[in-house]
Amino acid sequence: MEILIHVSHEETKVALVENRQLAEFFFERKREAGVVGNIYKGRVNKVLPGMQAAFVDVGLDKAAFLYVDDIYVEGSDILPGEMPQDEQSPPPALSDEIPPEGMLPEDPASVPVPRPEPSRKMPRKPIEEILTEGQEILLQMTKEPISTKGPRATTYISLPGRYLVYMPQVNHVGVSRRITNEEERQRLKEMVNALKGGKGGYIIRTVAEGMSESESRSDIIFLELLWQDIRSRAETMKAPSLVREDLDVVFRTIRDYLTNEVETLYIDDLKEYKRVMDFIGTYMPDYASRVRYWEGTTPLFSAYDIERQLSKALEKKVWLKSGGYLVIDRAEALTVIDVNTGRFVGENDPESTILQTNLEAVTEIARQLRLRNIGGIIIIDFIDMEKEKNREKVFQGLQESLAHDKARTNALKISDLGLVEMSRKRVREDLVHLLGETCAYCDGKGYTKSLRTIAYEILEELRSVPLGGQNPKEKKAILFVHPEIQTVLQEEERDFLQAVERKIRRQIVIKSDPLSHIEEFSIVAP
């Protein structure tokens, strides 16, 4: 894997490239910084008992949404022996070292910490007994604002380090599921348990595999001091205010992605390169040789064809190497992916051709989900297969491809209709929303009415115009339309237009306005 960082005055772009293909993309604009991972001191605006949630003013355009299960209550912390699930099969919050879709999709600053399971002896209090309007609280953003919704927040704070994620309110040490060696898992867990202070828990990240005691101690000391500083600052601040801003996109990339899997990290800005090398030299000297300043005559993103690949990621149709293709359609609450054989006709029987297309599709679907940052409910319509073993093979291939995705996914087996229902955790807008906006011309419909449809609507409207005099030339009806509609009415539909003139006993004068919308028209009939 290679990491490309392009820095300009207005924004910083990061591309993760696997085998010269764009695998993930994220960016940070100077005027649109993300909020995931930021810690705020907020003021409760409204408590909603019916939803068991609250809205908290943190100084942003939209209030943060806080659900009752995301509120830490003093005395409800978990002890190591009280985890709701076995450590070998940790709960979703622990099983993902990094959250699914932050401004950096893999930013551990927004890892949801494990929340206490309500016990039978101490049921969770309703939100109206925990929060009151006007109350000031410390909270961390876990989701960016999406569409009309404000950011999502939690009062369970998580602070990421290089090897560990510190959770001040939770007494538990968890190990990333991506560390599979049982002896290494046990070694790391025992080491962190021995080194950590009193209250507080840790998630041991994947990059910590092989971590030494000194590296663990340094991370723990730094993170616990950072938490003390955050608490001290929060006490002196008035709500709403930003207590701690998360690292910028460059340092988050280094913290979260610069591992042994990365061959090279290129930066095309000399000032940023020197800043990164100062950090690397102090905290990650073993990786210094992998960080390079891009000195090529061709711009970095152009050399790797990033912009073209980004443009293709905004298109509905995605071609497969065999000649088949995917069609990706977004709806309000779900995404539908349709698999088609396209130009691929195969060489053997139809079932073999369909199987080969579906198997090729699963790899590309998994890549597109990561690249486009598609979240929520996803329906995949595979080409129908008659043999059950082929369905199993395709589903297994999908599961294996999704295993590379750090976002939490859950897929159900292929149904009799050839459909896979799955979900992917969403924290922010997908790539289309981040890089684009609703089409101002079609208003997001994805189409405009045909020229003939518009022309016939105009003719129908003209028939309701008040009648003119006995002589059609005495009174006129003036029609203002788009130039293309004028051409249709005066040429293709001229006989219908003349029939309307005779009916309303008026001469119809058509005037065009090139600045008008193609569906807009107006009639003036004095």
Image (spheres, grey):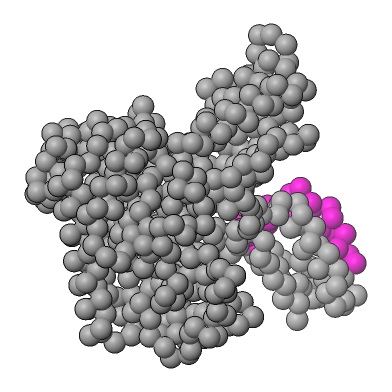
What residue do we see at 54% from left, 59% from top? 438
Q: What secondary structure prevails in the magenta region? A: helix
Residue 132: x %, y % from top left? 48, 89
Q: Pinpoint residue 241: horizontal percent, then vertical percent.
A: 30, 80
**As rendered, which of 224 and 251 lies closer to the eye?**
224
| Magenta stretch holds residue 67 | no
Q: In the rendering, at what x and y percent does residue 444 appear?
A: 60, 58
* Quarter of the picture holding the N terminus: top left
Q: Quadrant of the C terminus?
A: bottom right
Q: Residue at x 42, y 75 (%)?
A: 75
Where, by quadrant of the figure, is residue 404 drawn? top left
Q: Is residue 105 left or right of residue 332?
A: left
**Quick one: 215 or 344, which is closer to the camera?**
215
State whether residue 353 appears in this view: yes
Q: Quadrant of residue 382?
A: top right
Range of residues picked out in magenta: 481-503
